[in-house]
Each structure stands twice: as structure tokens, then as C-alpha cells.
Image: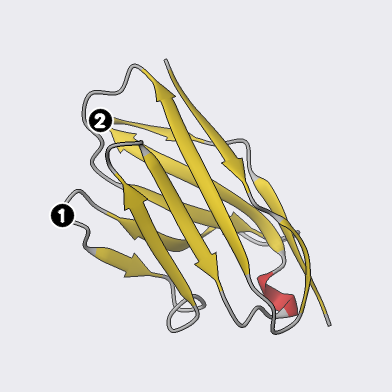
Amino acid sequence: QVQLVESGGGLVQAGGSLRLSCAASGSIRYINTMGWYRQAPGKQRELVARINKFRTTTYGDSAKGRFAISRDNARNTVSLQLNSLKPEDTAVYYCYLEVGTTYWGQGTQVTVSS
């Protein structure tokens, strides 16, 4: 069984920054892709960023130029640096990883006030 634990969410003013982290534990032998999705109230879940085993990154349109994803393979962690936050970034952010099966974290709330 694989477990993901997210941390780092919270309340921040527009223009501020947050850093989200996600630690994976359990029966993990090989992680392909790790990343983050988010879901705002009344909206579909959308890709924020992902990073594969070659450290190739992909960003959603809303994240480009403002967010940065990184991973530590030795520690099975993935982090997301959120900069220049906007009220429309308010959402629950979910980390995930792919090891043949996709696992999800429980989500962490990010709230950006105007």
C-alpha cells in the first residue's frame, strides 16, 4: 500500500508564496511520475504540474511562469513552489504518483485572499 501525505497549504495574500510538499511511503519500488492537481469549488480537477523520472516537467497553463515543481527521488517526495499567487489559485491541491497504479493524497487547501 502506498500513502501520500501533503503539507504546506494555508492562507496567503495575493502576490504571496507557498510551498507544498508531498511525501510518499509504503511499498514503493519505482516511481514514474509525481505531480499535483487542484480542484476549486464547482470546477473540474485540473493539472497544475507533473515531473517524470527523467525530471521532465509539464505545467498547466495557470501554473506556467509562477509555479515550480521538484522531486527528491531518494526521499520519495515532490514539492510545488507557488509564487505570485492569485485569488483564482484558491483550491484544494492534490499530489499524486504513478507506480503502475496512480495514488492520490488527501489534499491540502490553498486559499489566496485579495
Query: From the viewer's perspective, is 60 left or right of 81?
Result: left
Regarding residue 33, the answer to whether it shows in the image is yes
Farthest front residue in view: 74
Residue at left 25%, top 30%? 100
Q: Is residue 84 above or below residue 24?
A: below
Regarding residue 45, the answer to whether it shows in the image is no
Q: Secondary structure at mark 2?
A: loop
Mark 2 = which residue?
A: 100
- Number of numbered labels in the structure image: 2
Query: From the viewer's perspective, is 39 left or right of 37?
Result: right
What amino acid type should be assigned to the residue bearing mark 1? Phe
Q: CA distance from mark 1 to mark 2?
A: 16 Å
Q: Secondary structure at mark 1?
A: loop
Farthest right residue in view: 114
Quadrant where the C terminus sits is bottom right
Residue at left 32%, top 67%? 58
Q: Report if the CB atoms under discs 1 and 2 are less than 8 Å apart.
A: no
In the rendered image, residue 48, in percent from the top left (x then y), is placed at 48, 64
In the rendered image, residue 102, in percent from the top left (x then y), is placed at 37, 34
Report crowding for label 2: few under 14, some 14 to 19, many 20 or more residues within 10 A (C-alpha): few
Mark 1 = which residue?
A: 54
